[in-house]
Amino acid sequence: ALTVLARSSIERVSLGDSKFVTDDTLASLPVSLTHLNLNTCKKVTGAGVARLTGLRELCLRGCERLSEAGIAAISRLSGLTHLNLSR
């Protein structure tokens, strides 16, 4: 299913509260993605998120695997206007 998603023009995706979402899942998302909700996705890292260079809004509330290096990678997403890192 995610293979089809990667070739789509979808801009908004909510995968929050999923224990199955990983960095590999994020690699399958479309480059057209501008808004992403990953609330409490405990297997996601900043490096996985940083691959999504078109993001404007990103919610990572409760994502426990975010390291300083991962947050630094996310901070280089030049189009990002809204970021939620709350616990």
Image (cartoon, rainbow, N blue to C red):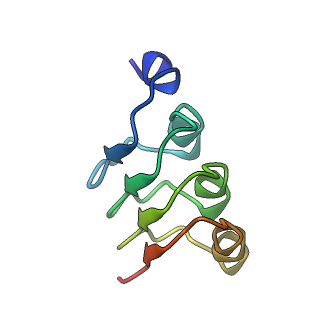
Q: Along the line of sight, which residue is nearer the eye, 58 or 43?
A: 58
- Percent across and percent down for residue 10 are 39, 34
Residue 58 horizontal side relative to residue 52, left or right: left
Residue in the image at 43% along x and 74% along y: 82
- Percent across and percent down for residue 66 are 56, 71
Q: Along the line of sight, which residue is nearer the eye, 66 or 3?
A: 3
Residue 79 horizontal side relative to residue 42, left or right: right
Quarter placement of the N terminus: top left
Identify the image quadrant of residue 87: bottom left
Question: Where 43 sits versus 21, above or below?
Answer: below
Residue in the image at 45% along x and 75% along y: 83
Residue in the image at 57% along x and 46% along y: 23
Question: Where 53 sits versus 85, above or below?
Answer: above
- Percent across and percent down for residue 5 are 43, 24
Residue 2 horizontal side relative to residue 61, left or right: right
| Number of on-image labels | 0
| Residue found at the far left of this picture | 17
Residue in the image at 64% along x and 68% along y: 74
- Percent across and percent down for residue 37 are 35, 57
